[in-house]
Image (cartoon, rainbow, N blue to C red):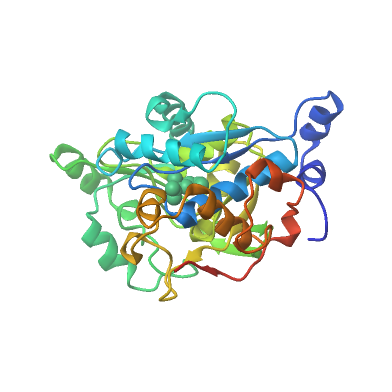
Amino acid sequence: MGKKSRRTLYLERSKSYVAAVWNGWTVPDGRFAPSPSAPLHVGNLRTALAAWLFARHDQARFTLRIEDLDRERCSSRYEASQIDDLARIGLDWDGEVVRQSQRTELYRDALDRLVADGRVYPCWCTRAEVRAASSAPHGPLPEGAYAGTCRELTTSQRAHLQRSERPNALRLDARGEEITFEDRYCGEVSTAVDDFVLWRADQTPAYNLAVVVDDSDQEIGEVVRGADLLDTTARQLLVARLLGYETPLYAHIPLVLGADGNRLAKRHGSVTLSDLALLGRSESDVLSWIATSLGLAERGEIVTPKGLVARFEPDQMPLEPSVFS
Ligand code: GLU
């Protein structure tokens, strides 16, 4: 995509953004949005630093958003450790930390608008039923896509299920729409969107709804996140379009791998700041490794995030995966 800055890309995309710049408002924001379901590992910290550098390089705001909607998996203990670890490697953020668990009303309003537009239906399928139905091929949808079982229910079947005790999720009637977008690093992506869950059966908003509402509400200009989330983007862009939101740009960055070539995870051993501290590796050593893997430092060079801002160039991002061992 050449040497265009995020500001230029956004200018090309958005007339209202032109007005914003004209009026001297700031460039669109960046964010890091971890789920506090485990401590951050080196790969997560690397994504956080990259997202921070994207924003700071453009003198933009940077928000920390805690995606804690999954009450079973998330805990305040992990949230505290994540915030602490981000600060320990020298990252900062503007304003208060935002927690999705405190923003349910915003997500409910967005859901209500989709309901009013006739784009939502209840779904009683269990996980096993979704899996069984999705293994059969169904048109252009990607593997594992929801087969639309509950969309096809008759009125009486639906009424019967509604009377039962079985809790239901709410799904988007995506109508198999195909979404095409340009990712800064992955190029053009084109996917048909399945009827994914907007509101879970446990009555919590689903990630793919909440993330769209937040990225719009927080005026995120370019979503910088791990490449594992590339597949969620078409879903999010469809929701954004249906809600009439300005959409952000996307930059999915390659993940850090363990020595076995799989995505870095806890089972790879010492992968968090506290694990590594026990091996005598300070946060400054970890930051140095991350900066080197981003092509911003010499091996072993001691750096600070602020010192890296001037060296950072989004187009120089190494696209081959980094291996941490
Ligand atoms: N909360 C998501 C995660 O930790 C990231 C969401 C996003 O960056 O869009 O995987």
281 with respect to 16 (left or right): left
Lateral position of residue 153 relative to residue 187, left or right: left
The number of numbered badges drawn on the structure is 0
Q: Quadrant of the N terminus?
A: bottom right
Residue 188 image-quadrant placement: bottom right
Provide residue 19's location: percent of width, then percent of height.
Answer: 82, 29
Query: Nearest the camera: 182 or 1?
Result: 1
Q: Is residue 274 visible?
A: yes
| Residue in the picture at 26% in, 42% down | 201
Location of the C terminus by quadrant is bottom left
- The correct choice, above or below, for 2 with respect to 242 in the image is below
Residue sitting farthest toward the left: 165
Can you say whether 275 is above or below 212 in the image?
A: below
- Tell me, yes or no, if residue 178 can be seen here: no
Q: Nearer the viewer, residue 173 or 96?
A: 96
> Residue 224: x, y in percent?
60, 49
| Residue farthest to the bottom, as pictured | 260
Residue lying farthest to the right in this orientation: 22
Nearer to the camera, 144 or 171: 144
Q: Is residue 131 left or right of residue 220?
A: left
Between 110 and 319, which is closer to the camera in this rendering? 319
Residue at the spot x=68%, y=41% of the render? 306
**Residue at point 58% right, 32% down?**
93
Above-or-below relation of 218 to 157: above
Instruction: From the top left corner, tell me how far across and down residue 228 is, in percent.
Output: 48, 60
**Residue 153 image offset from top left, x and y in percent:** 28, 52
